[in-house]
Amino acid sequence: MNRQAQSAVLFLLGASLLHAGTTDLYLRYVKAGLRPLLLAAGAVLIATALATAWYERRATNRKKSTEPSTPASPHPEPRVSWLLVLPLLALILVAPPALGSYSATRTGTSLQEPLAYPALPATGPLRLSVVDYAGRAVYDDGRTLTGRRIQLTGFLALDRDGTPYLVRMALNCCAADAQPVKVGLTGRIPPVLQPDTWLEITGTYTPHRVKDPVNDGPIPFIEVTAARPVPTPKDPYDETWNT
């Protein structure tokens, strides 16, 4: 590709990053804290594209003014190189779905022992993340959960034997390193379970736990008393590990 085409591709890439960063689209790729860097990268790419186009045009005009008038013998660049633009158009036009049950059931739970357990409100239902509940249930033996009404939100995944899990994909940086944390469901489970359905679960702590068949990691359970479908959250990933 010539310099003008290169600058066009750079401009489109920068515009794609700005589009993703100014909407919620970027949350499908990276954690929320990287938004300023994403916007800065988009701005730098657009500035680079404009500078490249300006210098190339200036050099072309200077060359035309100094060279004698002779017949040109152009060598066109291969058109296949423009296929590089297709991923950029896909980024702008198509929002990929967040990782779901397919990835969760093929990857072992990646629960990590928390460094500390933040204080919980003394009264009322506990609205916890799946990661927070799982960490307290496994590594703190549910001491801060016993006797409390708990609410969790995640998507459904079904194990090979039909065991239902409430899952949240936890990430450190971006969707490429997202790993599942699973909580098994028991009690008043909805009669019809559709994988990837997002649910708000209300229940209580139970000491029951099993080992993940994929990697033998610990999977705690929650005793479900109520469940209702909810829309996919704006940020489908859990960033508890980064806080």
Image (tube, grey):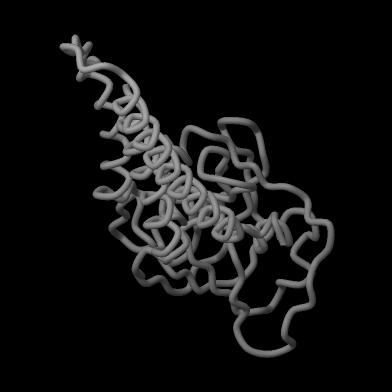
The foreground one among 22 and 32 is 22
Query: Please, which residue is most extreme toward the left here?
Result: 71
Please, is residue 174 above or below residue 85 in the view? below
Quarter in which the N terminus is drawn? top left
Residue 128 x, y percent position in the rendering? 61, 70
Please, is residue 176 above or below residue 197 in the view? above
Q: In the figure, is residue 133 to the left or right of 41?
A: right
Residue at 61 percent of width and 47 percent of height: 173
Query: Please, which residue is most extreme toward the bottom here?
Result: 123
Residue 237 x, y percent position in the rendering? 51, 55
Query: Please, which residue is most extreme toward the right here?
Result: 116
Residue 227 x, y percent position in the rendering? 41, 71
Question: In which quarter of the view is residue 58 placed?
Answer: top left
Quarter in which the C terminus is drawn? bottom right
Please, is residue 60 above or below residue 43 in the view? above
Residue 195 x, y percent position in the rendering? 34, 49
Residue at 74 percent of width and 88 percent of height: 122
Question: In which quarter of the view is residue 141 placed?
Answer: bottom right
The foreground one among 120 and 56 is 56
Residue at 58 percent of width and 50 percent of height: 170
